[in-house]
Structure formats: structure tokens, C-alpha cells
Amino acid sequence: MRFADVIAHEGVKERLRALVDNGRLPHALLLEGPAGVGKFAMARALAQYIHCENRHDGDSCGVCPACVQHSTFNHVDLIYSFPVLKNGKSQAVSDDYIGEFREFITLSPFMDPEEWQKSLGNVNGQPQMYVEESQDILRKLAFTARASNTKIVLMWLPEKMNVQCANKMLKLIEEPLPGTSLIFVSDNPREILPTIYSRLQRVEMRRLGDDIVARHLVDTLGMPEADARSVAHVAQGSILSAEKEARMSKETDQFLEFFTRLMRLAYQRKIGLLKIWANEVAGLGREQEGRFLEYCQRLVRENFIYNLRMPQLNYLNQAEAQFSSRFSPFINERNAEKIMAQFNLAQTDIAANGNAKIIFFDLAVKMILLLKQ
């Protein structure tokens, strides 16, 4: 992985290059920020840059033996560390799942924790790093580097270290071994043991711009630009979230159909059909019902903005835009906030395990009144 392969974050790249080039790379470095913005890819690029035998133009060469070994996840002086499951065994370390992890990195470069958990074979487990992990790292670092001047530990999600593991890693951070570098990558830095967090030099990687995420979707998935802009806006700067949203396009189509039917039947005051609608939506299941209500709130906001006649402010896919061109006049300054409040209240009631059929039928009846305002 070269810096050139990492999307955006040019300021972070420049800072990391400068640390290495000036011999000021800290013993323990943390890349922190929201999930899905390319932090682990950046960490891999940094590790390759450190080991590269022919760095030039601010990047690793990509062709020297060290770079080739990095590209195949086989560099002898690079140690991967990540959360695992024991799955009935008395102990477990990263090396037990290194094959699965290499495949995971290849298929999910933006590091989806849910996909990693599936790779571990237990979707209900709680992956973590056990005390054996820190012991294994200490054992490996006790040997001097063999193919470079620096042994690197690349740890994904240090917040998943259990207390015993974290305490042993703390000692390594406080008393660094010569010729070693620890690079941590965290989605939730607040969950890292405070005594460790305070000793790390931190580099923040912020959310990506919507235009960058949209361009990625157009280039890699072939999405129409309007749809890509809509998905990118919902994803809030995370390529991981954007790719998930794109894969869930069938669900989005279903949500749009439910929303349009609700509004049409409410406007026509067809109580009987609204009851049937409520029963259908109630059959989605709690999690999907919650996502549907979030979708409804977004579409109400977008329709309110649609009335401003400023297309650059709207983030609608083609089907949503076609519907909104006719529906948006019914969302105005008199009812927009009230409609949003009803969707939000329904979402709260669903999360509290309320009766979904009653909640959605009550919501539908209230739409009849609100759309007439």
C-alpha cells in the first residue's frame, strides 16, 4: 500500500512523510478518526514507506523487495495485531487468524468490523485482544529486525484490548525497545485505556468530503452521479458507510415505496388502506423499521430543501428526485418540523419495543392532519 493508493487526506500524508524523513517518527503513533475513512490503509502506507528501500517523490517505490513483501502481507518485520475470538479455545492471538485477516484486508480495505466478525465465525461474539496477544507481541519484538532497521507493530482497534493486554502494552509504550515502532489505528479512541491514550502521539483523520466519497462510488461501483451524491451525503464522509448504503439500494427502493404510499394514502384520507400499510411496515422487524423511520426523516428534510429551488443543496437519487418534484410543495414551514417530530417519536417508540402496528397506524393518521397544514 503506497500513499498514492490512499484516498485524499493529503495533509496527513505530508505530516507522516515529514516524521519519517526527518527521523522524528514517534515510538507509539495513533491514527484516529471515524470508521471508513481509510485509517488502516494510511497506516499500511506509512509502514511500507518506513521499510521501503528506495523512497522517492514522497512515497514508497512499490517495486523494491520490501514493498513487494508489504503488498503480499509478508514483510518479516511487520507484525499485524487485531481483535479475535477464542471460539472455544483456551487462548487466541492474531497469528491464529492471519490468513483470514489478509483476505479481509483485501476484500474490505476500509475495515468493516462487522465483516471481520463474520470472518471469525461467530456473529454474536465480542472480538478483543487478550493478554496472550501482548505477550506474543513482546516475544516477537525481542528479536532484532531482520530485513530493515525497524520492526513495526500495526494494531487495528486498540480499544478492543482487554485490561490485562492493555497493561502489558502500556509497559512496552513506556519502556520502548530499540528499533521498534507501534502504529495504532482506532475508530473509537475514547475507549482506549486512558494511560495508553495519553502516551500516544495522535494524528487525526477526519471525515471525507461528500464529493470525494461520491467520486469513489462513481469510479468503483459505476453509480450514476446523482445517486452517488445522495449516498455520499447520507454516509457522512465514510466510504465504508457509503459502500454499505450502495449495497442496500434494494432496501432504499423499498423504503421509498413505503414513504410514497404513506403520503399518497394520507393525502387521500384512505384510512383502511393506511391500516394495511401500517401492518406491512410493522412486518419489517425492529432494526429495519428504525432505518425506515430515519429514511423518512431524511426525505422530509430533502423535500423541504427542494422547495428552495437550489439543486446543489439536495441529495436525492433519481427516483427520490422524481417523487420530490411533485411532493415537495406539501412540505412547508408550517408542517415540516411537526412531521419530523412524529417520525422521530415513532422511532423512539419502536426502539422501546412498542407495538409496531399501533405505532405506524398512529403515525399514518397523524400524517393525514399534517399534510393539510
Image (cartoon, rainbow, N blue to C red):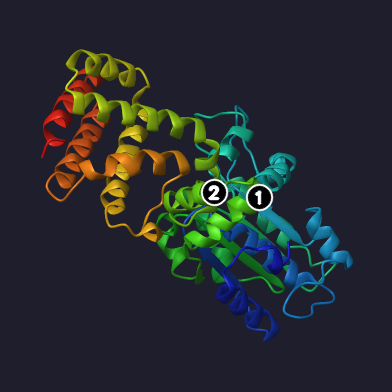
Q: Nearer the viewer, residue 310 or 43?
A: 310
Q: Is 303 located above or below residue 119 in the figure?
A: below
Q: Is 47 located above or below residue 190 in the figure?
A: below
What residue is shown at x 32% (from left), y 21% (from top)? 281
Q: Nearer the viewer, residue 339 or 44?
A: 339
Q: Are marks 1 and 2 in contact (CB under 8 Å)?
A: no
User: Mark 1 highlights which residue?
Assistant: 220
Left or right? Give the position of 255 relative to 368.
Answer: right
Q: What label sits on residue 240 in the rendered view?
A: 2
Disc with the residue nearer the chain's start (1 vs 2): 1
- Identity of the amino acid at label 1? Thr
Q: Position of residue 155 (x, y in %)?
A: 61, 56
Q: Position of residue 140 (x, y in %)?
A: 73, 57
Q: Nearer the viewer, residue 218 or 173?
A: 218
- Identify the element where label 1 is drawn: helix
- Which quarter of the figure is the C terminus placed in? top left
Q: Position of residue 99 (x, y in %)?
A: 75, 41
